[in-house]
Structure formats: C-alpha cells, structure tokens
Image (tube, grey):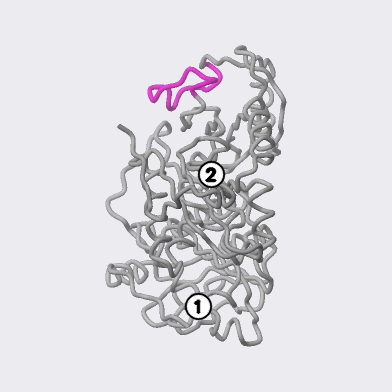
Amino acid sequence: MKTPARPINEDARLASLDKLHILDTQNEERYERIVRLAGIVFDASVSSFALVDRDRVWFKASVGFVDQGSERPRDFAFAAHALLSEEPLIVPDTLEDPRFHTNTSVTGPMKIRSYIGQAIKAPDGHNIGVLNIASRAPITALTPQHYDALRLCRAMLEEELERSPAFEVGPQQPESDQEQKLTPIWRGLMLTGNDAKILLDQNMRLLDYNGTATEYFLLDQDHIGDNFLALENLLSYPGLQQDIGEVITHGVALERRIKCIRGRYLICQITPYRQPKESRFGVIIGLQDMSIVRRHRLLAAVISKLPGNIALIDRSGNIIFTNAAWDSFARRNGAPMSMGVAEGVNYLEVCDNAELDEAKLIGDAIRDVISGQLGQFSHMYTCTTSEGDLTFHMSVNATHALDGAAVICHLDVTDWTDQGHSRQSDLTLTRHE
C-alpha cells in the first residue's frame, strides 16, 4: 500500500477547511441527497462526501456501509489520494492497483474492488474534500454521461459549501437583478458537452449562454439581463414562449423536436431549476443538433469497421470511444479495464503508471498533441501477446471527431516487418511546420 503524499499547499488547505466549521457537525440532508444521487448513477455499493483533515478523513455524508460521522486515518484512505488531483481518480480494479491492493478496505469486510474519487473545492479554491464512489465489483466501462454526472455532483457539493454561513471569501458586492451570481452547478452545466445552452431566470431574462448558443440566437454580452423572448433567433419554433412559460410555472421539463431556418433539425430541452429564495423556476434551454448526432453515429460506424485498433480520448485523456478491432484485441489479451484500454479509463494515467520509460514518453507526446503543441506522432514497437510477438505502428493525431481531442491507432504491421522492412524502435515525433 502506498501512503498518499501531502499537497504542497497543505497549510493553506487546512486553514480553508477550518474556516468552513464543518468538521464533526451533524448530518445534513443537502449533502446526503447529492451523495445518494452519485451512488444511484454509478450503481455503487457506497458513496460518500469526505473531508480530508490533518491526520484523518471524516465523512460528512455517506450512503452504504460507511456511517456518517465516522472517520478513517488519512494515510489509509482512498480520498487522500483523490485529493491530490483536479481530475477524478479512477481505480477500475483495486486488486490490481499497487496503491490499494493491500488496503484493509479492499482485503477486509468492505471488499472494495473499484473506486472513483473527485476532489471538492472550498469557495476559495482549495481542495478540502472528496466525493467517493466505491463498489464491490470492478468497473467495466464508464460513459461520457458518467463523467458529466460526476462533474455535476462536484458542482452541487461545491455550491452547498458556498452556502456555509461561516465562510467568507472577501467583501461581498451587492448584485442587481441583471447581475445575478451564477452558482457552480449552472456554470458546470454550461461547460458540459458541445450542445447550445442558455440560462434564463424566472422572469425569462437572459443570465448566461455558451458559445454554441450563438449559432441559433443573435446574442452578445450586452444582452445579459434582457428579456430573452425579445431577442432574435433562427428557430422555427412558434411555441417557444408558451413552452418556457409552462416550465417556469409548473417546474416540469419538456422536450421538442424543432427546425432551424438554416435547415438543421434540433432537439430542444427546457429544464427547470430553482434559485435559493425564489418561488418560481428559471430554465435552462439546451439545443442539440440532430445532424451532428447522425454524423457522429455514422463516423463511429465507419471507425468501428477499420482494421486498426482505434480509440478516441478527450482533453483529459479519458478514453471515450473504441472500435471493434481495439475491443477484440483487448479481449483476446486480458480484461480491457485491467489492461487500461476500456472506455472510461484515463489513457494518460496508464502511460504514466507503466513501468517502461517508453510509455511515459508516449504519454507526454499525447499531452502535446492534445494541447496543440504537436500535430501528430508515430511509434513502432513490438509486444508479446497471446498470439506471439507482434509489431505495431502506433500513431496519434489531433481530432475533434466524436467530441474527442486525439485519436490513437495501433496498426498490426507484423507481416510487413517480417518481409524485411526495418523496425523503428525510437519514438518519432512529427511536428507542424
């Protein structure tokens, strides 16, 4: 078992936690319902919100076989590892992870086999706690929707921490009706996915929007606070005002299939939300381009039939799509999740944790592709498989297909090299001119 490191800002982090006056307090439904939601989404054996103190991890809310108010030594807690990163810590199989395989939560009565941990920030930005999701079964796959749910649960917990009366970030400026503060959960919704999203208050005034929304509505920042229905749009949607009014009044979401005057077909989702101390609902309008959905499905079908072992990763390095050849090769050579090649696994972490220095170099090169510093790179290597020693040509290219950031392809070139062609052993980086 590996003892978790301490953050370099540990003293400031602990001071931030102390300011909240939340340690050793009573159970609160507002935290427990978020934890319960996370457990349902991930079908988890236990879910919890834990605060990482100086030498202990204390559970503010918990659902499952960990009691609220209980604590665990920090050096033995999964949460102490998850606290160290902004990205979620995903452990598909604890028995195969050297950090946790001898942990008593794994070997003892709890029998934890998989774990997901997401660091939670205090209002001043310090990581003070962790949303924990654990199960007695290994993780076989995580979908993009799982990652969306994790981000939203994180935003909801951080919103509740902002409501803690004892915490003061600094002087509070009064807000006018047209300058309402957007809480983290709505900001998280704005940043999730590539669909158009628009946030309105209970009086149909525009509070915020994302970049994609400008494809359908003539918006700029000067329109914040204006009546949304007075703004020009490119939709063929005569019932828009009535539908928004229905959701504001009754708080029930609805969905419509509509047409844009540019010829696109869209799915419009109008979802209610309620700000604190407000009796009526505001709404979030989401627009999804069906032509993009169809193109994504077609592209996925084409990629699935290609002979190379292909995967797409997002900007964080998470595998979000694999083709049939990739999945077939993984199944023939072991469990895809334990090999670090299943959807939902962070491919960059797999490279970082590999024993070979070569794998770490590949991980660094993939990061350069994602960040735009590198256009593409390729690498020839030989590996031992259930079918014998095979030679592969690996290539990584930047892409925006299927909401990815990079596409990884491992092409079996064993026959080609057996015919006398040279095998390239060094990492080759091809940069933009």
Whether residue 98 is situated above or below residue 326 in the rendered picture: below
Residue under label 1? 98
Q: How far across and how far down the image is residue 24, in percent? A: 47, 78
Along the line of sight, the residue nearer the viewer: 156 or 321: 321
Query: Quadrant location of the C terminus?
Result: top left
Q: Residue at x 67, y 18 (%)?
A: 259
Residue under label 2? 275
Q: Which residues are magenta?
A: 214-230
Q: How far across and how far down the image is residue 385, in percent? A: 61, 64
Q: Residue at x 64, y 82 (%)?
A: 110
Along the line of sight, the residue nearer the viewer: 219 or 303: 303
Answer yes or no: do the residues labelled 1 and 2 have beta carbons within 8 Å?
A: no
Mark 1 Cα-neighbour bin, 10 Å: few <14, some 14–19, many ≥20: few
**Would you identify the image quadrant in which residue 34 lies?**
bottom right
- How many marks are shown on the rendered structure? 2
Q: Residue at x 55, y 52 (%)?
A: 418
Q: How far across and how far down the image is residue 305, in percent? A: 69, 39
Q: Residue furthest front?
A: 420
